[in-house]
Amino acid sequence: MDLHGASVVIAGGKRIGAGLAEQLARRGAKLTLSYLHSRDEIESCAETCRGLGAEVQTVSSDLRDPEQAEALISASVQRFGRVDVLICLASIYRETKFADLTPADYDDMLASNLTAPYHTAIAAAKAMQSQSLRGGLHGKIVFFTDWAVDRPYRHHLPYLVAKGGLVTLTKALAVELAPTILVNAVAPGTVLPPANKPTAELEQIAAGSLLQRIGTPEDVQRLVLYLLEGTDFASGEIYRVDGGRFLGPSQTDVAD
């Protein structure tokens, strides 16, 4: 897909999404950036992208609410005439030990990490289906799941259940929307560890990957850009970007 002039919605662009938005701005994409609690960060990202010559709008959205998810997609259509790409990064990540789990932990994780992407993708897909083909496609959807859905670590049970559901959503939605809407997911390893993560844990994570290092946001962004502009022949796939950590020593099961 040619990204020049394409209308791209990025749901949750505070961290990895900010750099991705800048890459898309350089390629001439028109951007709709959503946020819930990160207004300042998203507005700053939007200004940077405008400085690169891109048309950008920001939208406050609680994507757990289907009406707000639909409103986000409608904002893209109203401003730019269509939506060609949806990138769902919105997520929450919180450690909860098994002994401390409550029903609210499960509900919260599923709502933010599975329900919100579901509502947003359904709204985007319906909008895409109603518009003309662009380069032979109605559009592309990229989700963000987690490398650990196939190799869980401790103290993140509800989070990993939700991300596992997102893997199934990716595959099922790819089937539903074929052949003119492509749906894939990226499953990062550690690329932006919390600032308070102990050095010893970071060293353990690096040692547990085949490439012996922590990843960078750019590692993930390059894969997303490949899925958007590098190929139109991939759908229903989950792409790990974990430096080979999935194949590393089994004892390195510390959380990201």
Image (cartoon, grey):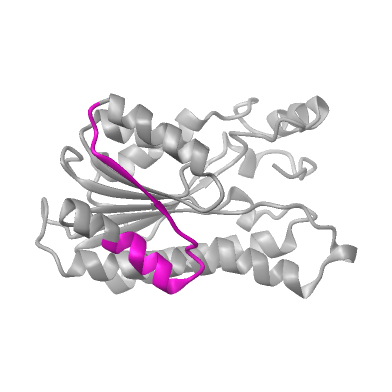
Q: Tell me if residue 134 is in the magenta stretch.
A: no
251 vs 203, nearest the viewer = 203
Q: Is residue 156 left or right of residue 99?
A: left
Magenta-drawn stretch contains 54: yes
Q: Is residue 209 left or right of residue 222?
A: right
Quadrant location, the N terminus: top left
Q: Position of residue 42 (x, y in %)?
A: 45, 40
* Residue shown at the point (58%, 68%) measured from the top left: 111
Residue 170 found in image quarter: bottom left
Residue at 26 percent of width and 28 percent of height:
26
Residue 104: x and y in percent read: 74, 71
Q: What is the quadrant of residue 6 in the picture?
A: top left
> Viewer-proximal residue, 226 or 101?
101
In the rendered structure, the answer to whether residue 191 lies left or right of residue 153 reads left
Residue stretch rendered in magenta on the structure: 53-74
Look at the image and tell me whether residue 17 can be seen.
no
Q: Residue furthest right?
A: 99
The front one of 70 and 219 is 70
